[in-house]
């Protein structure tokens, strides 16, 4: 049993040493120019951005309404009483047009505060948008780095499975020529099976990371130019 473990470990180390030389870091796959494009795309397309921008528009509209509502404190009225009209129910001492201007002092003095409050609402809405810009930017970066990591790991596992396949074929040929033992042949097949399973898991992780990033972009990564 110990001998089988040594053989299997040796095969795995042989495969991994070859794949490690192929790519020792994922940093070479990271493009900050492309990352900036991803961030810009997310800010332009992600639906929640429209929600924050809509709040700013509503707040600005409220400011305009409050500024125009200064006129609400003033009221104008007039009464026309012809000279030849006698109203016994409500006798009037003046004839012709009677004009009156009214000023609601309570409403008048409330207007500056209302306008100021509306302007503060615009600022708060803008602060929320700015904060979400930072949050969204950080999230795009995090998902992009996970995407690059998954892609690098997929390449690694693909190379590992290819190497394991080549080794298993070589050992199979040697076994058919009676140049190696059945035990070594079995170990090579087990090694290839393990490498293949790792590749499948890497493919799944890559697709999940890609879908997670595209959720923020609302489009395929390949469509970002």
Image (tube, rainbow, N blue to C red):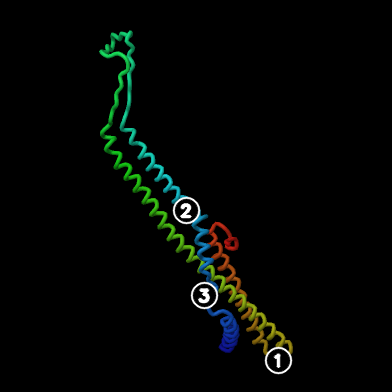
* Vertical placement of residue 139 versus 152, above or below: above
Q: Which residue is mark 2?
A: 49
Q: Looking at the image, which residue is at 41% across and 56% down?
A: 130
Identify the disc placed on residue 27.
3
Residue under label 1, please give it. Answer: 179
User: Could you tell me residue 19's position as x and y percent?
Assistant: 59, 81
Q: In the picture shown, does residue 35 fall above or below 53?
A: below
Compare residues 26 and 102 and report the one nearer the observer.
Answer: 102
Q: Quadrant of residue 129?
A: bottom left
Residue ID at (58%, 89%)? 3
Q: Quadrant where the N terminus lies? A: bottom right
Secondary structure, mark 1, is loop
Extreme bottom residue here?
A: 179
Crowding around mark 1 (Cα neighbors within 10 Å: few <14, some 14 to 19, many 20+) is few
Name the outermost residue toward the right: 177
Residue shown at 39%/51% (left/top)?
Answer: 125
Q: Is residue 184 left or right of residue 59?
A: right
Quadrant of residue 220 in the image?
bottom right
Between disc 3 and disc 1, the foreground one is 3
Q: Position of residue 221 (x, y in %)?
A: 57, 62
Mark 1 or mark 2: whose residue is earlier in sequence: 2
């Amino acid at each position: 049993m110990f001998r089988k473990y040594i053989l299997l470990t040796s095969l795995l180390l042989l495969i991994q040493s070859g794949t490690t030389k192929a790519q020792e870091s994922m940093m070479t796959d990271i493009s900050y120019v492309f990352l900036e494009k991803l961030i810009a795309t997310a800010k332009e397309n992600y639906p929640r951005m429209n929600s924050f921008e809509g709040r700013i528009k509503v707040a600005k509209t409220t400011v305009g309404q409050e500024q125009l509502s200064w006129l609400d404190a003033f009221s104008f009225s007039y009464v026309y009483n012809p000279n030849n009209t006698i109203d016994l129910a409500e006798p009037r001492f003046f004839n012709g047009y009677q004009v009156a201007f009214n000023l609601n002092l309570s409403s008048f003095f409330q207007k500056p505060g209302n306008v100021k409050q509306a302007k503060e609402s615009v600022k708060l809405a803008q602060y929320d948008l700015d904060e979400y810009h930072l949050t969204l930017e950080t999230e795009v970066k995090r998902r992009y780095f996970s995407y690059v990591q998954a892609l690098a790991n997929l390449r690694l596992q693909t190379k590992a499975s290819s190497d394991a396949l080549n080794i298993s074929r070589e050992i199979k040929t040697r076994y058919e020529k009676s140049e190696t033992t059945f035990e070594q042949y079995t170990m090579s097949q087990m090694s290839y099976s393990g490498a293949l399973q790792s590749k499948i898991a890497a493919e799944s992780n890559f697709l999940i990371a890609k879908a997670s990033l595209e959720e923020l972009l609302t489009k395929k990564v390949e469509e970002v130019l």
